[in-house]
C-alpha cells in the first residue's frame, strides 16, 4: 500500500566492525544499537529483499507486550519467566515508541490494546486459563460476554472474550521502513543482497550474492532463514501464515464492524483466525499455517474468505484487495535463541510469532551484548531457556504437519 521503495543496492566498502544479516525488526534494532554504542565504526546491514517486503512489513501489525509463551522450563519457574518477559517487552515497547516519536515515524501507532475472543467451549476454557495467568502476572483485563463483544466487534460469533491494554497497532510496513530510514548515519544498509555463506570464525568472511565483506562481529537476524546458512538447523522450523485486506469499505459497511475505528482480535486457539479493523476503513483477516512452503493461493483465498464470511455474514461483499503469505520461525518449546553462538557470532532467531516487539527488544539487547555492554535486561534475556532439539527430516515434517492438522481440528470454530 506504500509507494515503491528505493534503498541502496550496494556499497563500495568491504571491511566493517560489525555486519548484521537481515533487515527485519531484530536486525535493524541490533544495527541501531551497535552504531549508537560505537559511533566511530561503520555497521553494515545486508537485507536479502527490500525493507518492508518480507514478514516485517506484511504482518498483522499487533505490537504485543505480553508473553505468548511461558511454558519454557529451564532453571526458572513459568511465573518468573513471564515476569522477566513482561519487563523485557515493557522496556522494548518504551524504546520502540520513543523511536517512533523521536523520528516522527508515520505508522499509525495506536495504543488501544487487543481483544481475545472464543467461539467454542474449548476456546472459552483456553481464555479462562490465560486470564488466570494474567492475574498471576498482574496484567489487567476486562472480561466481555457475547453482547459486549457484539457491540464492540459487530459480530455475534464469539461467546466469551476479554480486552487487555497490552498491545499497540501499527502499519507494519510503515514502521519497518521508518526504522530503516532513521538509522544512525554510521549504519550502511544494503537491500536486495542476500548473504550466501559465512566463514567459521572472526574475522568473518561474509559472501553475498554480489560481494565479499569482512567483519569482526556478525549479528544473525534472519530468523528462520538462518538455517540456509547452516545455523540452528536442528532447532528452527519455518511456518507460513496467511492474511488478506479488504478494499476501503464504505461507511454503511464499516458500521457492521463494531463501534470503534480500530480494533483487533487474537483467537482462542493457536490455529485460529486473527481479525483487525484497520484505521482508514479496511478489514484484515489472518489465518492458516503451512510447514516450510507456501500453500496454494486458491486454498489461502478460500480459507480467509470463509473465516470472514462466517464471522460477518451480513457484509455486502467478502472480496479482498490484497492476499499474501509470509514466514515466521518457530521452535519446539517456543523459546527464542538469543546470545553468542561462537566468539563474535551473535544471533537472535526463532521469534515464535509476535516478533515485531520481541525482535525489536532482543535485537537491541543483542547489539548491546555484541558491544560488551551489560544490563539487568540483558541478563534476563540471557537467562531464558533456549530452543530444544528437533528430530531430523522426514520425522520433523511428519511431526509438524500432524501437529498442524491436529491443532486445526481442535480449533474448530476458532479457525
Ligand atoms: C501474515 C503474518 C502475520 C503476522 N502478524 C504478526 C503480528 O501481528 N505481530 C507480530 O509481532 N508478529 C507477527 N508476525 C510475525 C512477524 O512478522 C515476525 O515475528 C517478525 O517479522 C520477525 O522479525 P525478525 O526481524 O526476527 O525477522 P524477519 O522480519 O523475518 O526479518 C528477517 C529478514 O532477514 C532477511 N534475510 C533472510 N535471509 C537472508 C540472507 N541470507 N541474507 C540477508 N538477509 C536475509 C529477510 O529478507 C528478512 O527481511 C506475522 C507474520 C506473518 C507472516
Image (spheres, grey):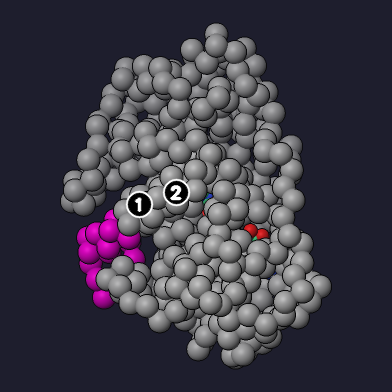
Tell me the SS state at disc 2. helix
Residue 336 in view in this figure: no
Q: Residues within 10 Å of mark 1 (few under 14, many from 20)?
A: few
Q: Is residue 104 above or below residue 245?
A: below
> For the view shown, which residue lies furthest in the right direction?
210
Q: Which residues are magenta?
A: 71-89
Q: Using the rendered view, name the quadrant where residue 316 is placed.
A: top right
Residue at image x 43%, y 29%?
Answer: 263
Q: Residues within 10 Å of mark 2 (few under 14, many from 20)?
A: few
Q: Using the rendered view, name the quadrant where residue 232 is placed.
A: bottom right
Q: Could you tell which of marks 2 and 1 lies nearer the N-terminus?
A: 1
Foreground of the two, 210 or 236: 210
| Residue 142 shown left or right of residue 120 in the figure | left
| Residue 366 shown left or right of residue 401 in the figure | left
Q: Which residue is mark 2?
A: 102
Image spot of residue 213 (x, y percent)? 71, 81
Image spot of residue 390 (x, y percent)? 52, 72
Q: Is residue 99 above or below residue 147?
A: below
Q: Which residue is mark 1?
A: 94
The quadrant of the picture showing ligand 1 is: bottom right
Q: Residue 204 bears which disc, if any?
A: none
Q: Quadrant of the N terminus?
A: top right
Foreground of the two, 62 or 353: 62
Foreground of the two, 8 or 71: 8
| Spatial separation of the CA atoms under disc 2 and disc 1 | 12 Å
Amino acid at each position: 500500500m506504500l509507494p515503491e521503495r528505493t534503498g541502496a543496492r550496494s556499497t563500495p566498502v568491504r571491511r566493517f566492525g560489525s555486519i548484521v544479516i537481515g533487515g527485519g525488526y531484530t536486525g535493524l534494532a541490533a544495527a541501531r544499537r551497535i552504531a549508537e554504542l560505537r559511533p566511530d565504526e561503520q555497521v553494515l546491514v545486508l537485507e536479502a529483499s527490500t525493507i518492508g517486503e518480507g514478514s516485517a512489513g506484511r504482518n498483522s501489525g499487533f505490537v504485543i507486550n505480553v508473553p505468548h509463551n511461558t511454558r519454557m522450563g529451564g532453571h526458572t519457574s513459568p511465573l518468573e519467566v513471564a515476569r522477566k518477559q513482561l519487563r523485557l517487552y515493557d522496556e522494548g515497547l518504551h524504546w520502540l515508541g520513543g523511536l517512533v516519536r523521536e523520528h516522527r515515524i508515520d505508522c499509525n501507532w495506536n495504543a488501544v490494546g487487543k481483544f481475545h475472543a472464543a467461539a467454542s467451549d474449548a476456546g472459552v476454557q483456553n481464555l479462562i486459563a490465560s486470564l488466570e495467568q494474567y492475574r498471576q502476572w498482574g496484567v489487567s483485563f476486562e472480561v466481555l460476554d457475547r453482547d459486549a463483544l457484539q457491540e464492540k466487534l459487530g459480530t455475534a460469533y464469539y461467546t466469551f472474550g476479554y480486552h487487555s491494554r497490552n498491545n499497540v497497532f501499527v502499519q507494519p510496513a510503515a514502521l519497518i521502513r521508518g526504522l530503516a530510514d532513521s538509522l544512525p548515519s554510521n549504519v550502511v544498509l544494503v537491500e536486495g543482497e542476500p548473504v550466501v555463506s559465512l566463514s567459521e570464525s572472526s574475522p568473518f568472511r561474509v559472501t553475498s550474492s554480489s560481494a565479499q565483506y569482512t567483519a569482526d562481529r556478525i549479528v544473525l537476524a534472519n530468523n528462520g532463514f538462518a538455517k540456509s546458512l547452516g545455523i540452528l538447523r536442528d532447532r528452527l522450523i519455518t511456518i507460513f501464515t496467511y492474511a488478506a485486506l479488504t478494499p476501503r469499505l464504505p461507511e454503511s459497511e464499516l458500521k457492521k464492524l463494531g463501534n470503534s475505528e480500530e480494533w483487533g482480535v487474537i483467537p482462542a486457539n493457536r490455529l485460529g483466525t486473527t481479525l483487525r479493523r484497520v484505521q482508514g476503513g479496511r478489514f484484515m483477516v489472518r489465518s492458516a499455517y503451512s510447514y516450510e512452503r507456501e500453500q496454494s493461493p486458491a486454498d489461502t483465498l478460500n480459507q480467509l474468505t470463509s473465516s470472514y464470511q462466517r464471522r460477518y455474514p451480513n457484509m455486502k461483499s467478502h472480496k479482498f484487495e490484497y492476499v499474501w503469505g509470509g514466514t515466521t520461525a518457530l521452535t519446539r518449546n517456543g523459546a527464542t535463541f538469543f546470545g553468542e553462538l561462537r566468539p563474535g557470532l551473535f544471533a537472535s532467531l526463532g521469534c515464535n510469532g509476535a516478533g515485531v516487539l520481541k525482535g525489536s527488544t532482543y535485537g537491541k539487547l543483542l547489539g548491546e551484548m555484541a558491544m560488551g555492554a551489560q544490563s539487568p535486561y540483558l541478563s534476563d534475556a540471557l537467562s531464558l531457556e533456549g530452543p530444544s532439539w528437533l528430530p531430523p527430516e522426514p520425522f520433523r515434517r511428519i511431526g509438524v504437519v500432524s501437529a498442524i492438522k491436529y491443532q486445526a481440528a481442535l480449533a474448530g470454530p476458532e479457525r
